[in-house]
Image: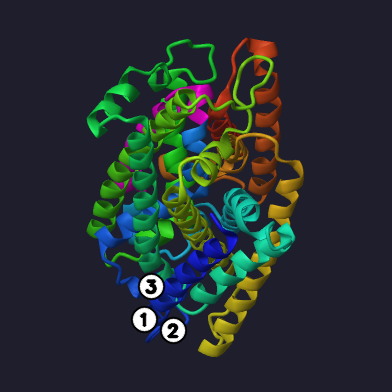
Amino acid sequence: MEPIFILLILCGYFAILLLISHFTSRKTDAETYFTANRGSVWYVVAFGMIGSSLSGITFISVPGMVGNENFYYFQLVLGYLLGYGIIAGVLLPLYYKLNLVSIYGYLGQRIGEYSHKTGSLFFLISQSIGAALRLFVVAEVLQRTLFDHFHVPFAVTVIVVLVMIWIYTRKAGIKTIVWTDIFQTTIMITAIIGVLLIVINQLGISFFQAGQVVYDHNYSTVFNWDWQHEKYFWKQFITGVLVAVAMNGLDQNEMQKSLTCSNLKDAQKNITLYSVILVATNLLFLSFGVLLYVYVEDKGISLPQTVSGAFKDTDALFSFLSMQQLGGIAGFLFILGIASAAFSSADSALASLTTAFYKDFIREDNKSEEEKIKTRKWINVMISIFLISLILLFRAINNESVIHLVFTIAGYTYGPLLGMFAFGLFTKWETKDKWVPIIAVLSSVASYILSTHAVQWFGINLGYTVLLLNGMITFTTMALIKK
């Protein structure tokens, strides 16, 4: 596909986002950016959240990872269902009861100000790293397919993407994002289905035959019952539950959208519908990955492999086939999909990071509307600069599947959040609040040491369950120093 055509696609896509922003930015005030004035429709929020949750990582990494890990990732996804049930039944009622904008305000009310700040800070670190990784994946693809042709440096590519996001979210924030997410989720799912149909057509089989091919393929093995394996079922399933609770229920980015619903009942319906769609969409991406590898084998395409026979750089598989093997329509759909993945994940991350920092660290209750908006915009700009720096750092050091990196980092950053919220929810104890920041840091350090030596010491690969270990250490330590 010609680079100039790709550029025109991106410009047209951005124009639509600006149009949506224009209509959603009317009649806004300082709080609209954070809460959308509590006026969002629950099913609109539910469908739109799919785009930001899937992001470029799911769009690119999940289909490629099938070649080395079968459908083991789906064990994690199945755990999401129980995790989202906990969010709907336990966390959302709490957030609505306390009328929270930043969910970390709960820690301040229940435990103390140090815990409040610690929870928000760990979210800021977690979300910054996660958002930067997601944007890194997408920016790499845009760099290879478009900006390299015009000799544009990678740093400029990243800056351009973030500036575009800032432009259409700067006024109405989460109110705009709720509606742009609808558009972007639709584009992403349409793109994946479109390329899927092209692959099926070029394989010369029907849609139903394709389903049988996926079902019969050894890559579609879902369950792993080897308890010592990193992908052991119960290890993955329990981690899926914890990931849903920690990385969604305790995550300002995900919860901020649910809290824009007008009441608790609508927010609970939103989370329930969202969880079902999320599971189905992940199954679609995994099935699509199997068909991509079937296509590679059928056409005799050689993919780089390690000495042990594992595929290298699986994140590049979807991009490579769409842009160089499957024809112009597939390339067109891929660019649309990757653009939607970039904007849908980054815009909500930028808004939630701004919200957490503004609500948890800045005190401007007595300031005017104009002063509040000015401060919020400056925070928005500074966070954007920080994300750009992180993306450039990841480009210099990353050498593995990004989805693994995201979940690995989450184990060390969301673990303390899990422990602090569990302590607040499931005990009536009071702890020594000023020690909580130290506990959170040392808990992550201890979890890292145990995780990296678990095979040597205990003969067990902890994998993503380091999230549970980290949360347990935080919870136990807070209990030991209770008043």
Quadrant of residue 76 within the rendered picture = top left
Q: Quadrant of the C terminus?
A: top right
For disc 1, the neighbor class at 10 Å (few under 14, some 14 to 19, many from 20) is: few
Percent x, y for residue 88? 30, 47
Which secondary structure class fits the magenta region best? helix
* Relative to 455, residue 362 above or below: below
- Amino acid type assigned to the residue bearing label 2 in the image: Asp
Mark 1 and 3 residues: CB-CB less than 8 Å, in contact?
no
Residue where numbered disc 2 is placed:
29
Magenta span = 65-91
Residue where numbered disc 3 is placed:
36
Mark 2 and 1 residues: CB-CB less than 8 Å, in contact?
no
**Element under disc 2:** loop
Residue where numbered disc 1 is placed:
23
Percent x, y for residue 5? 52, 63
* Identity of the residue drawn at 49% across and 11% down: 227
Q: Earlier in the sequence, mark 1 or mark 3?
A: 1
